Each structure stands twice: as structure tokens, then as C-alpha cells.
């Protein structure tokens, strides 16, 4: 990922913590910090995606500076954060559709209660900054041209509600009169790229194109999304670490949108094969539109996306081909 960090003039502290380090985005953030020479403690329960855990941790475990604590954040204490400058809090229970119903308790535990524990431990240990992963799902609105951070949040799924609660919880910890810890919350807009979770759309599209097995598109495909390459999200995390603010909430997206139907065509072009699809009704919690207004991100943390959707898709396809997770992928050469 180091090439994505060009232009990020950051000073990386000696000791950092990455929660969710075995996950999709957390593993990239940890890898970037290790590349800058930081000693990284990754904290992850490693339960959510057993297949992904080994794959995501392997590049981290090659670094002497990396240590993994397999633990639930509900049990985290100040001891884990002693001497740490910045905590990157990426652990969460993701996924909109599965947040309805009986699994909601896991969402509350991992997205709200765990964030409270992280903030308590960070404050007690004297951590300078916590960079919190939030989500565009806190907005929910559709009657604006782009979401800016001043919009009143109106999430449309239990997942969005828990992400909003977690973000706001972290901020109130930092706003206590006696607080020394500062918080920057980053609202990511649909993230994709190497190591993307198997349940997410772009990986499913590429897999469908390569295997010929149809994928299900929920809704009519006209829904619009702002897709953000994972390298841009890593850069936003590093910039947030050094930003001159006590508390802030900023969008991390591209400001560009594409419909799912146009994305299917683009994935078809990049893979050189059409994406076979079947359509199913939209599911509860699916929003018709997301688009980041990125002016605040540029002002507060100096962030701007750098990777186009086509380039990012090519990189995800290359990774899927190299890791051999998809039958036939090794034979596909991404079209440029
Ligand atoms: P992921 O599931 O790949 O990674 C999350 C990791 O957190 C997993 O490895 C999981 O084991 C760990 N975890 C969960 N609960 C835990 C707990 N209680 N204790 C310890 N570890 C725990 O998810 P991701 O896609 O990498 O998302 C990372 C962050 O970004 C999350 O906060 C997510 O809400 C946010 N986000 C992601 C996207 C996206 O498009 N992927 C978009 C918006 C926001």
C-alpha cells in the first residue's frame, strides 16, 4: 500500500494500536504504520471471518514491530495502551442487512460498548489521539446533492444507528472538561480494494465475472454509491493522526458517484468478462444514494482521494488473481 501514501507527509509515532487489525481496512492501516517503523499492537478477537484472518495478518506478521493481541475489546484495559500515542479504532461488527434481528446485540457490543471501553482505556493510559472509524451509513438522507458533516444524521439501519452512537460516544469522551485524549472520527464511504470482505459488492461482482456464477443485486441497480479505495482510507487515517484539531468528524469518500448498473459494466470491462446477475428486491436498510462532500476532510486533515474507481478495481482484481481465491482468476489479466 505504500505507493498510496505518497503525498501524506506524516510523522508516525513509535507506538500505535490498531483495533480490528485482522480485518479488511485495519490490516492495511497496520501495514502502513509498520512501513513507517511504528511498533504496532493489533487488537482483534479474530472471530468474525476465520478465513480472512490468516490472509490479512500474514503480511503484518512478517514485521518484527507487529504484535497481535487476540482479545475482545470489551475486555481492553489501560495496560494495553501504555506508552501509545495514537489508537486507530477500526474494530466493529460491519454489515447493514445482518444488523436487523437477533444479531443486533453483537452490533451493540462491538460498535458501541467496545468503543466506550477503548475510550476509557485510552483516557486512563494518556493516549493523545484516537482515530475512530465511522460510516456514511449515519446519514441515511437522500434529498441532498452530497452529504456534508453538518447534516442531521438519520440512519436507516440498526448498523448505522450503532456506528453513529459509537462515533458520538468517542467524541463525548474527548469533550470532557478533564480530557487529554483527542478524537477524529472518519466517516468512510463504501470501501473496496485488496482484502475486501467477502460479503461486499465489488468482490462479489469480480468473483461472479470470473466464475460465471450469477450474483444477486438487491434493488433495481440504479442506486448510487461513492466507492472509496482502501489506500485512500489508509491515507486519511494517517493524516487524521497528525491533524490539528481536538475533535472533528470528516467524510472519507471521493465525491464521485456511480450507479450499481454502471459499476457492473465497469467490472465487466476491467475483467474482460460480463458480470452475470440476478435481481432481488431492495432490502431494509439499503440506501438509494451516498455521496461524500469532501471539503471538510480537505480542510481539517488535508485529505483528497487519489485512486480512481477503474484503477482501484484493477488493483482489487490483481489481488484476487494473485491470492488465487477465485477459480480462473489467475488467467485474467486486468484491462488497463
Ligand atoms: P472487518 O470486519 O473486515 O474488520 C473488523 C475487525 O474487527 C474484524 O477483524 C473483527 O474480528 C474485529 N472485531 C469486531 N468486533 C470486535 C471486538 N468486539 N473486539 C475485538 N475485535 C473485534 O471490517 P472492515 O470492513 O475492515 O471495517 C473496518 C471499520 O470501518 C469498521 O469500523 C466499519 O464499521 C468501518 N466502515 C467500513 C466500511 C467498508 O466499506 N468496509 C464503510 C464504512 C465504515
Image: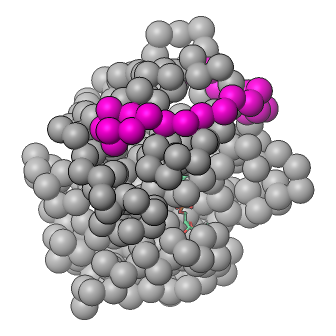
Q: Quadrant of the N terminus?
A: bottom left
Residue 83 vertical placement versus 324 (above, below): below
Task: Indicate which quadrant contains ligand 1.
Answer: bottom right
Residue 198 vertical placement versus 336 (above, below): below
Of residues 333 and 93, the one nearer the viewer is 333
Residue located at (59% from left, 77% from top) = 50
Q: Residue furthest right?
A: 102
Colour logic: one colour
Q: How many labels sit on residues?
A: 0
Q: Position of residue 111 (x, y in %)?
A: 66, 57
Residue 199 vertical placement versus 308 (above, below): below
Of residues 229 and 181, the one nearer the viewer is 229
Q: Position of residue 118 (x, y in %)?
A: 56, 68
Q: Determine if the magenta segment contains residue 204.
A: no
Which quadrant holds residue 10? bottom left
Q: Determine if the magenta segment contains residue 278.
A: yes
Q: Quadrant of the C terminus?
A: top left
Q: Position of residue 125 (x, y in %)?
A: 46, 77
Asked if residue 123 can be seen in this view, the reply is no
**Horizontal relation, residue 100 to residue 151: left or right:** right
Of residues 315 and 114, the one nearer the viewer is 315
Q: Position of residue 243 (x, y in %)?
A: 26, 47
Asked if residue 222 can be seen in this view, the reply is yes
Residue located at (52% from left, 46% from top) = 212
Q: Main secondary structure of the magenta part?
A: loop
Residue located at (59% from left, 8% from top) = 143
Magenta residues (range): 268-289
Residue located at (61% from left, 42% from top) = 215
Amino acid at each position: 500500500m505504500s505507493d498510496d501514501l505518497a503525498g501524506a507527509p506524516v510523522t508516525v509515532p513509535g507506538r500505535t494500536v490498531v483495533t480490528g487489525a485482522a480485518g479488511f481496512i485495519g490490516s492495511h492501516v497496520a501495514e502502513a504504520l509498520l512501513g513507517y517503523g511504528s511498533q504496532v499492537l493489533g487488537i482483534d478477537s479474530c472471530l468474525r471471518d476465520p478465513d480472512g484472518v490468516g490472509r490479512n495478518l500474514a503480511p503484518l506478521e512478517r514485521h518484527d514491530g507487529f504484535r497481535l493481541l487476540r482479545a475482545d475489546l470489551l475486555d481492553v484495559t489501560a495496560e494495553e495502551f501504555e506508552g501509545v500515542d495514537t489508537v486507530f479504532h477500526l474494530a466493529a461488527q460491519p454489515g447493514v442487512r445482518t444488523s436487523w434481528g437477533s444479531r443486533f446485540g453483537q452490533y451493540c457490543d462491538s460498535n458501541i460498548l467496545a468503543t466506550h471501553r477503548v475510550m476509557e482505556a485510552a483516557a486512563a493510559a494518556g493516549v493523545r489521539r484516537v482515530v475512530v472509524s465511522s460510516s456514511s451509513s449515519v446519514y441515511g438522507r437522500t434529498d441532498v446533492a452530497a452529504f456534508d458533516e453538518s447534516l442531521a444524521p438519520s440512519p436507516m439501519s440498526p448498523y448505522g444507528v450503532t456506528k453513529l452512537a459509537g462515533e458520538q460516544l468517542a467524541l463525548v469522551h474527548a469533550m470532557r472538561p478533564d480530557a487529554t485524549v483527542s478524537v477524529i472520527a472518519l466517516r468512510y464511504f463504501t470501501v473496496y480494494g485488496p482484502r475486501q470482505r467477502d460479503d461486499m459488492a465489488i468482490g462479489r461482482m469480480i468473483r461472479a465475472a470470473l466464475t460465471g456464477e450469477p450474483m444477486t443485486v438487491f434493488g433495481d441497480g440504479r442506486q448510487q454509491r461513492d466507492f472509496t479505495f482502501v489506500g485512500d482510507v489508509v491515507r486519511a487515517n494517517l493524516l487524521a493522526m497528525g491533524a490539528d484539531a481536538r475533535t472533528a468528524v470528516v467524510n472519507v469518500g471521493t465525491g464521485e458517484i456511480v450507479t450499481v448498473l454502471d459499476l457492473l459494466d465497469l467490472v465487466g470491462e476491467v475483467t474482460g468478462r460480463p458480470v452475470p446477475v440476478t435481481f432481488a428486491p431492495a432490502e431494509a436498510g439499503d440506501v438509494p444514494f451516498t455521496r461524500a462532500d469532501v471539503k471538510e476532510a480537505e480542510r481539517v486533515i488535508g485529505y483528497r482521494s487519489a485512486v480512481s474507481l477503474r484503477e482501484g478495481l484493477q488493483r482489487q482484481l490483481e489481488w484476487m488473481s494473485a491470492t488465487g481465491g477465485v477459480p480462473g482468476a489467475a488467467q485474467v489479466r486486468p484491462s488497463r
